[in-house]
Image: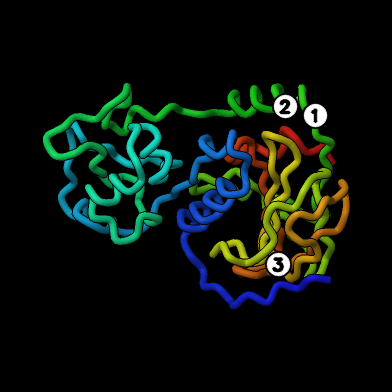
Amino acid sequence: MVQNTGTSRSHHPDSVKNSRLSRTLARIASPALSLVFLLVLGACSTPSGPSAGVQPSGPGYYTVQKGDTLSSIARKFRRSNSEIIAWNKLSDPNDIKVDQALRIAPEGARAGGNAVASRNRRPVEDDGADAAAAAADRKDPVDWTWPASGQSSSGAGQGKKGIDILGQLGQPVMAAAAGKVMYSGSGIRGYGNLVIVKHNSNLLSVYAHNKIIVVKEGQMVAKGQKIAEMGKSDSNTVKLYFEIRRQGKAVDPSRYLPSR
């Protein structure tokens, strides 16, 4: 049995939690997928760097939206992360904020590409997009099951689409589908002892707040196999926070999990 012995982490806003999680997802994804992984950003505190206070706008600037990250913004405008960091004098590039104005072009230059520095440019995603994604995945089907028994509720909010499953301390947490363990540890603040399983080229599942983890990175797991025990690491209550992610983006688990 593998027990995670990482040091306790303090609670952080959902924006930081999801940013750290998605950076890890991007690192473990195949090279073909890594460019489309998005970091989920929620509302949080005052922006750092020169954008604090009066917010600049106009050509050469972009207003951060929910779901944006430094990497996704850099890709959108065909810039490098280092350029965005330098132009905005960011002290913590992992802590950009919703509604923060970022310079995405050198001073005196306009933004490249077709994107416009406007909060209205971000495409709106809805349940129809989730439905279309689930339909596409039927071509490379994954046999899903619920990862734990217990009362479930939406964990949505701050850009999240996962579910919380309430249970008992030490209760088994199972792999929701067969796959390969891509992450096993406590290095992502706000998620506690975390397991990430890759099921095919598009789909991952995420299991957070475990008491202990009983699988190792690189291990192949079967559908319904115990991978952890339910806990409350980085959580105020005993629960499993579960996500299904398609190409790095959290999707509605109800479109994949069987009814119960």
What residue do we see at 40% from left, 35% from top?
75
Answer few, some or many: residues within 10 Å of disc 1's Cα (few below 14, many 20 plus, some between 14 and 19): some
Looking at the rendered structure, the secondary structure element under dot 2 is helix
Instruction: Determine whether 247 is above or below 212 in the image.
Output: above
Q: Amino acid at mark 1?
A: Pro
**Quadrant the N terminus occupies:** bottom right
What residue do we see at 23% from left, 55% from top?
89
User: Which residue position is annotated with label 1?
Assistant: 141
> Could you tell me how far apart the alpha carbons at marks 1 and 2 are, in whole angstroms?
6 Å
Of the numbered discs in the image, which one, if any, rests on residue 137? 2
The colour scheme used here is rainbow
* Residue 213 percent coordinates (x, y): 76, 66
User: Which residue position is annotated with label 3?
Assistant: 238
Looking at the rendered structure, the secondary structure element under dot 3 is loop
Left/right of residue 114 with respect to residue 197 in the rendered view = left
What residue do we see at 72% from left, 37% from top?
254
Given contact means CB atoms under 8 Å apart, are the residues at marks 1 and 2 in contact?
yes
- The front one of 201 and 208 is 201
* Residue 172 percent coordinates (x, y): 84, 62
Where residue 249 sits, quadrant-wise, is top right
Of labels 3 and 1, earlier in sequence is: 1
Q: Amino acid at mark 2?
A: Asp
* Residue 58 percent coordinates (x, y): 17, 33
